[in-house]
Amino acid sequence: LRVQAGQLPAIILLTDGEHNTIGYSFDTFSQHYQALGSSVPVYTIAFGDASLQAMQQLADFTHGAVCDGRGGEESLARCFRIFKGN
């Protein structure tokens, strides 16, 4: 991830909680994140059957935040406004 001066990087993860392939575990993610020395926050938006608990674990670990986007277009827009403020 290349960051230019004056930019604040972040990752926004939108998930429905369903795997379409065998995914990585939280432990695998956290090991890679720490090995990279990353400090990029991960903001998660939950849809469908996504686990808010799993999303909170990821957000807490990366100093990000969680937003429930299951309320339609207005909820999604609200999530992005919240994350932009962070």
Image (spheres, rainbow, N blue to C red):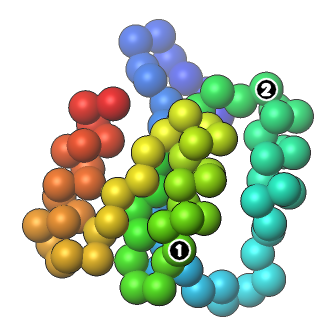
What's the CA distance linking mark 1 and mark 2? 27 Å
Indicate the quadrant where residue 8 lies: top left
Q: Is residue 18 above or below residue 26?
A: below
In the picture, measured across the screen, residue 16 lies left or right of residue 28, that is: left
Where is mark 2, residue-wise? Answer: 37
User: Would you name the residue on which mark 1 appears?
Assistant: 51
The kind of secondary structure element at disc 2 is: loop
Q: Residue at x 44, y 45 (%)?
A: 65
In the picture as drawn, the residue positioned furthest to the left comes out as 74
Above or below, comparing residue 52 to residue 38 in the picture = below
- Dividing the image into 4 quarters, which one contains the C terminus? top left
Taking the image as shown, residue 45 lies to the left or right of residue 29, namely left
Badge 1 crowding class, 10 Å Cα cut-off, few under 14, some 14 to 19, many 20 or more, is some
* Amino acid, disc 2: Gly
Quick one: quadrant of the N terminus? top right
Question: Which of the 4 image quadrants contains residue 71?
Answer: bottom left
- Between 36 and 34, which is closer to the camera in this rendering? 34
| Relative image position of residue 50 (x, y in whole percent) | 50, 77
Q: Position of residue 9 (x, y in %)?
A: 49, 30
Q: Are marks 1 and 2 in contact (CB under 8 Å)?
A: no
